[in-house]
Amino acid sequence: MRFKRLVAFTLVMCVALLLPAPAAHAQTADDLFAPATLNDLQVFMNTRDVQQLRDTYLENTYYQADIEWRGVRVRSVAIRSRGFGTRNPVKPGFGIDFDRFAAGQRFLGLQSLVLDNLWQDGSLVREAVTMALFERLGQPAPREAFTRLFINGDYQGVYSLVEAVDPVFLSRAFGDPGGYAFEYHWLNEFHAEYLGRSLGPYKELFEPASHESASDTTLYLPLHDLFREINAAPSATWRESVERLLDVREFLTHVAIEAFVSENDGILGNWAMNNFYLYRPSGSTQHRFIPWDRDNAFLAADTSILLRAGDNILMRRLLEYPDLREFYLQALERCAREGGWLEQAIVARANLIRAAAYADNRKSFPNDRFEADVAFLIQFARSRPGFVVAEVARLRGER
Amino acid sequence: MPLLSRCRFKGQLLILLATVLLSAVLPASSSFAQDSGSSPAAEKPAAKAAERDWDFRWDNRPSLRYGDLLRIDVRARLVTDMRRPDAAFVDNDTSRFDIARRRIGVEGEIGDVADFQIERDFADRRRWRDVYVNYRGIDRLELQAGQFKLPFGLDENTSSTNLDFVYRSRAARLSPGRDPGLMAHGRVGVLRYEAGAFTQDGDNGRASGLPRPSSGWTTAGRLLVQPLRSTTSVFEDFQAGVAYTSSDVQSGIADLRGPSALRDPFFRPEFAVQGMRRRVGLEMRWRPGPFSVQSELVRMASERLGQSVEDLDLPSLTASAWYVHGTWVVTGEKKTAGADEPKQPLFDGGFGSLEFAARVEGIRFSSAGLGPPSTGPRAETILPHRDGAITLGVNWSPNRWIRVQGNLIRDTISIPTGGAPLSGALVDGPSSSFWSRVVRFRFAL
């Protein structure tokens, strides 16, 4: 009997040894940006640099650091303070370049990464949910995931990991690593006016996120042409000229999503155009818009779906075409059909980060504000679709 | 005139030509009695006695004397460069006319116990140059106090009027330069020594724009041996020596830049340092007749204590430089007497002195670590940044006041690929060779 047991045990062990070991799961950027995951990201910085970064948080000085995620350590990354209205020394936002100090270095294939401090959003989930909605409706947008950030072991709070718009993003989103991308910088109220023949004003507004060393003519002449055509005198060829330089339907879909989520600081924002990238495919003149920084979304469930549409020259002129106006309304209807998904997305993300958010002593709002904002977003997701559908019907009836 | 009309620097060239002609007619030595009526104290008998001892004379330069008790010489230098490198640097024009030095000062002696020097440069942001007094009252020991160059580096401690090339060597850039301090020096037999303490680490490492790490007191020493000094052999002038400096550098950014031949930085190390900065130098010079050979090797190491991203120590940032140079005064003047004092000056029956010179040199910055290399300010491993250069020169001294130097320089710079280019680095690539041409006119009293 004992002999049989011994034989059986030996056979089991042999089979177990011969079976292939489970393959080690190679981490990818998809794992980092998995929406149901709360990451832990460790940053190692010299303590003097941490203090210096906080003391001079308005400067873009890069500091050397190591980062570690799920046991993967990346050395000699460059980290700096970032943000516009969200810059602060308490909970700074960070930009990370993986190849600034180490040529060609990548982290999970990424060239750079943004750590959004979620400073202006009491719910902490506005941007992540909005970007997910863009993707869900077929609009390429930066991927986002939440992380608990630690610097030298000290908890810094909940951050959003944001995929940077760079050649790696262009490759993933459009299969076009050689494309041209520009980050729009808000300087003054800009409603898509023509800024004149000089390329200088366009250079001030649009910072290249790829092809940084290309000539001004290569980078900015197509942008100049775009805004010149948008502002050309009305004619039978106006639309054709603009469509040659801009994917008009993509633009209308982009604005429709912003209108649905009641974005207060986007293309039709309260302070004119803001928070977007322009992308021009390699070998093409037709530009597209890429959303950025959505922490001012979900302003109110009853904002007009044409709020400030008349202020923007491009939007106003496109909506004068009945087929494009109808396209815009249909895009809004598609958004409205996502009301259920929207509520689920808000609840899931809020639940994911609740404990980490409560422990985040550096966030700009108290914990009860977190709960109140989440409740507001859930109510928004329930009531906004009906309001939008009714508005669409009303506008169709007016025709 | 066609030459002048094509020249971009006509004004400056005309001034220089006028200076050459003026210097040609300057008296070699003359004496002027001071105007006795100029002093209100002249009527006092005691003052009259003293007045008889005051003497203002021209002794190759204006000189005021009070018997044997005091000598004050006025020194002045005007140096202009015309330079044209073939490579463009981020920070600089590729071609320009520079007024490199515009200095005026006094030097002199107080009896036979002390000498002094005060010099100010109006073309340099560091305006006060040498400001010191040297006490010679003790046998085999002199004490020097004030601001002057730390006793390190043969090339660095050679007066700019006696340089064989337009620019000092790379090794001189690693030498500390000037700072206030106190130094003991003297000669004992075939040995010459210099040792001192200085408030900081010299001005060569001083930042221009960057927050410079503040160093504490710096000790420096130099020991030279001239073994055949008392003989009359051809090796009588041969000397060799060693030197060191040591200073404690507080946390900050190292700013000992790597200059190219024309002193544009190819390496601006924005690396954090803290701890001891030590230099060691070896030097040799031999000047038989109209020839000279000179060489130096300098190594500098800056500690980086607690400078890693985890506040741990990093390997030291090291820099090393060397050169070998030789000269030949083809018109026959002895090098020890100075080729800038021609036997037969221009307009005085001769051509002046003519000297050929050549220099080979190199400089290297790096840090040996175990981790992957990077260009970050806290990089454990810094790959070598190198510059090597060959300089061919010709020096013409038409008289004792004027010197014209022409240098043709071949630079070969090697910068490892990695990350964003360092500010001030070469525009056109990580590794390249290029020629530079520079002509210097110097007028010195």
Image: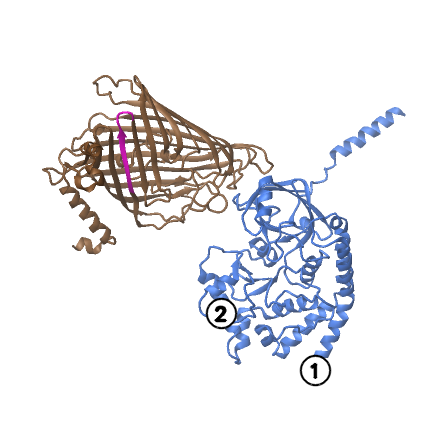
Chain colours: A blue, B brown
Q: Quadrant of residue B124?
A: top left
Q: Label 2: state its secondary structure.
A: loop
In the rendered structure, which segment of residues is drawn in magenta?
A: B103-113
Q: Give how far across and how far down residue A110 sits, in percent.
A: 60, 49
* Pointer 1 residue: A398
- Give amino acid for label 1: Glu
How far apart are the alpha carbons under marks 2 and 1? 35 Å
Q: Chain of mark 1?
A: A
Question: Which one is nearer the viewer's eye here, A225 or B357?
Answer: B357
**Residue B278 appears in the picture as rendered:** no
Image quadrant where one finds the N terminus of chain A: top right
- Tell me where residue A140 appears, x and y as whole percent: 63, 60
N-terminal of the two: label 2 or label 1? 2
Q: Closest to the observer: A362 or A36?
A: A362
Q: B344 left or right of A246?
A: left
Q: State the predominant SS element of the stretch in magenta.
A: strand
The residue lying at 72 percent from left, 75 percent from top is A391
Would you call the spot at circle 1 few (<14 residues within 10 Å), some (14-19), or many (20 or more)? few
Query: How packed is label 2: few (under 14 Cα within 10 Å), some, or many (20 or more)?
Result: some
Q: Nearer the viewer, residue A234 or A31?
A: A234
Which residue is the extreme one toward the left? Answer: B349
In front: label 2 or label 1: 2
Q: Nearer the viewer, residue A334 or B341?
A: B341
User: Which residue is found at the position 34% from the left and 26% from the top?
Assistant: B283
Tell whether position B112 is magenta.
yes
Residue positioned 48% across, 63% down in the render = A220
Residue labelled with disc 2: A195
